[in-house]
Image: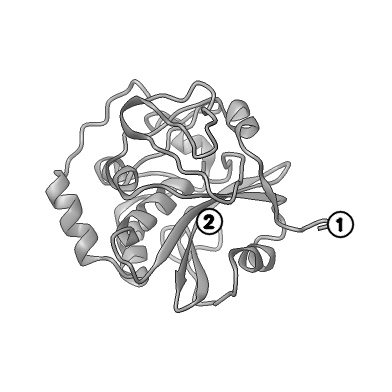
Amino acid sequence: MGGRGVKKFIKKSLLFLALGSCIGLSGYRLGQCSIYNQEIRPRHTREEIEEIVQSRNNPRFSFETVRDSIVFPLDSLKYRHYPGKSTTFDRWYSMQESLTLGHGVCIDGAIFFVALLSDNPEYEAKVVTLESETNGHAIAIYKENDSWHYVSFNTPKGLVNNSYFSYESFETPQELLLQRYPYHDKYLILDFNPETLKFGQGISGTLEEMIRSFDWELIKPTKNE
């Protein structure tokens, strides 16, 4: 989804990607959501994944781990051969899948980053998808000491491997998005469980059906709000 995005933004939608079903907290099904039928055999055991999570579970170490583990192509044509990614279907990779493949797009980096922080109670980390009429993106946000911060992968302003670590602080996720992503229209905050983030088999669904499945929040509220 780097530069494409998957459309939607709901305050808290709990997506479970485990073993065939992907039902959100709201009860919606993501269209034809199911395990994508191309198997990705993991290179790392569950124990190895957990060891990485325990050793790299602060924001800077997590960012560097993702940046150094995945190649992020800015050209969307280059990732269409990735398992489960195309113009109409989009499979999101868990941390285990990303480490196996060694490449991904913005939402895969965001999932990987949040997975690394998922067992550390000092941080509250979320995946955020962003959409406009012409563009889409995904980032990871996290709360530390009552302030929100963000990281972005597969982004043109990235310094190394198209990856960007922000040191800025914001009071709320909405302020962060309004200040740094005003050129997007709406967003969806995704709240995955740690098992899914680390070991999920990925989901696939038609993008148009996924767009209709959730209520998106506007980055720029209307005057009536």
Identify the mark at residue 92; answer none if there is no mark.
none
In the rendered image, the quadrant that contains the C terminus is bottom right
- Image coords of residue 157 (percent x, y): 55, 63
Tell me if 8 is positioned left or right of 118 in this view: right
Q: Residue at x 52, y 35 (%)?
A: 77
Q: Residue at x 55, y 30 (%)?
A: 28
Which residue is at the front of the view, 18 or 109?
A: 18
Q: Identify the amino acid type marked 1.
A: Asn
With 224 as the anchor, is 56 left or right in this view?
A: left
Foreground disc of the pair 1, 2: 1
The residue indicated by pointer 1 is 224
Q: Residues at badges 1 and 2 in contact (C-beta under 8 Å)? A: no
Please say if 11 is above or below 176.
Answer: above
- Secondary structure of the residue carrying tag 1 is loop
The numbered mark, 1 or 2, whose residue comes first in the sequence reads 2
Q: Amino acid at mark 2?
A: Thr
**Which quadrant of the figure has residue 6?**
top right
Estimate the x, y position of residue 106 in percent, counting from the top left.
Answer: 48, 49
41 vs 55: above or below: above
How many residues crowd around disc 1 within 10 Å: few (fewer than 14), some, or many (20 or more)? few
What residue is at 59 percent from the left and 74 percent from the top? 171
Q: Horizontal and vertical percent for residue 41?
A: 21, 32
Q: CA distance from mark 1 to mark 2?
A: 33 Å
Image-based side of 221 in relation to 15, left or right: right
Q: Pinpoint residue 89: horizontal percent, then vertical percent.
A: 50, 27
Numbered label attached to residue 155: 2
Q: Quadrant of residue 221?
A: bottom right
